[in-house]
Image (cartoon, rainbow, N blue to C red):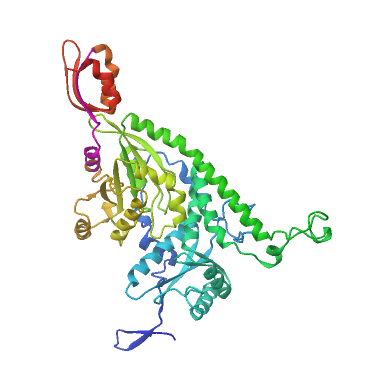
Amino acid sequence: MTHTTETTDAHGDETPIDPVDRVLAHAEGRSSARVFGTAQALQDSATVAYGDTDGDQWDREERAALRRVPGLSTELEDVTEVEYRQLRLENVVLVGVYPQGSHEDAENSLRELAALAETAGAVVLDGVLQRRPHPDPATYIGRGKAAELRDLVAAVGADTVIADTELAPSQRRALEDVVKVKVIDRTTVILDIFSQHAKSREGKAQVELAQLEYLLPRLRGWGESMSRQAGGQVGAGGAGMGSRGPGETKIELDRRRIRTKMAQLRKQLRDFAPAREAKRSERKRNTIPSVAIAGYTNAGKSSLLNRLTSAGVLVENALFATLDATVRRAEAADGRVYTLTDTVGFVRNLPHQLVEAFRSTLEEVGDADVLVHVVDGSHPDPAAQLATVRDVMGDVGARSTREIVVFNKADLVDEDTRLVLRGLEPGALFVSSRTGEGIDQLRAVVEEALPLPAVEVRALVPYDRGDLINAVHESGHIVSTSHEEDGTAVHAHVSERLAAELAPYAV
């Protein structure tokens, strides 16, 4: 039975509203995709600027060249020939389901999905929401509404439907059978963006593992290609005498190959671990504190790192522009050296396959001494951003790490919004990577939060051991120094290793 709600128009007449709500409409002559995308997750193009603080942006031209090539097939013909199942999205329609009372959250989520689809290379034509207590276990939105969706897809000329959830394999197949075009889900779009943006060997291996884990239960055969048997007569495609038997279907063969490839990727990722651990251990041995920059996707983490260190990390107004962790050296006002790490962004309903595959990258967050949690101050729902990021940080063991909340893009936030954000996080800082507002204050707060080395020493170091004084400046925290007749008197906090070297000169 179809339920309807009623609303009152300007003339006082009662107008029935179908529970499938149209979220997207053409407004003021602009394309739906642009209205939809910038409303939630992408910054307005008029406010995007790249400055000297972003460093050299050699990757931007290459990244732009990775956009979709129109007219390519999206059908996976043979998994052995396709390492990354990159979906060539074209014209898409979005669909979501929400229970009563969560309409605003559902609209925000669908707008974010539109920005994800746009980042992946799609043109979003329309988006619809259906209110129902639970998604239909068969077709996600119910067979009747699926038929309406088929008519909408035909009317706007879409060739792909994206569901705002992770569909079960049976739901995707059933919905595809009704709407007669390709049906994918939110997880597939995120995986596709990751496959486009991964650059390092480790990043590519992580993405491929996540894609294969997702693809394995969703392999679908078409026609007779999936029912071929390995045995049989020579003329029937078999290998003749000695080879006849129950055989192996094409889909079973593909599954076996996927499992073999996944085992290879897991071994490859384990092989990357020692080098990463060695670098991390060396930093710990030298007591170099680490600061991780974490936050929601497109919150401005890379821009902030560039502003703090001129790192030259790629900055782009797109979701998941950064996938590979970037570590840069920084120096505090007192001369101490520390590292700043730019990490992969988070998003609501982040696929668990990605959290598992990127666990090694996310360990940078869990092992950090200080966490700079960047939030987009101009976002319509910053509270949801905060909650999403903290959930993932809890999964990687970073709950106890000292957290500094930073509301970025402060140049786009008015005073009333700042009051609301201060109520949300009273101790947060307001910064703008674009204008430089609040950057010096952030740098001071980060330096103050850096942990002190373990051992307090007082020593008189001879002038011919300037290397020790230099080491104290680089990795220690100096309380006071003075030049005496026999050498440099120093009072400092240093690592145990450096304290042992200074022991002969202790006073």
Residue 364: within the magenta? no
Residue 456: within the magenta? yes
Q: How many marks?
A: 0
Decide if residue 183 is on the left or right side of residue 379. Answer: right
Give percent across and percent down for residue 19. 40, 80
Give percent across and percent down for residue 353. 47, 55
The magenta region covers: 442-462
The residue depicted at 56 percent of the width and 62 percent of the height is 218
Above-or-below relation of 481 to 267: above
Give percent across and percent down for residue 89. 53, 61
Give percent across and percent down for residue 440. 23, 40
Q: Quadrant of residue 457?
A: top left
Decide if residue 344 is on the left or right side of residue 151. Answer: left
Give the residue furthest to the bottom: 13
| Residue 322 visible to the viewer | no
Q: Quadrant of the C terminus?
A: top left
The residue depicted at 55 percent of the width and 54 percent of the height is 212
| Residue 142 visible to the viewer | yes
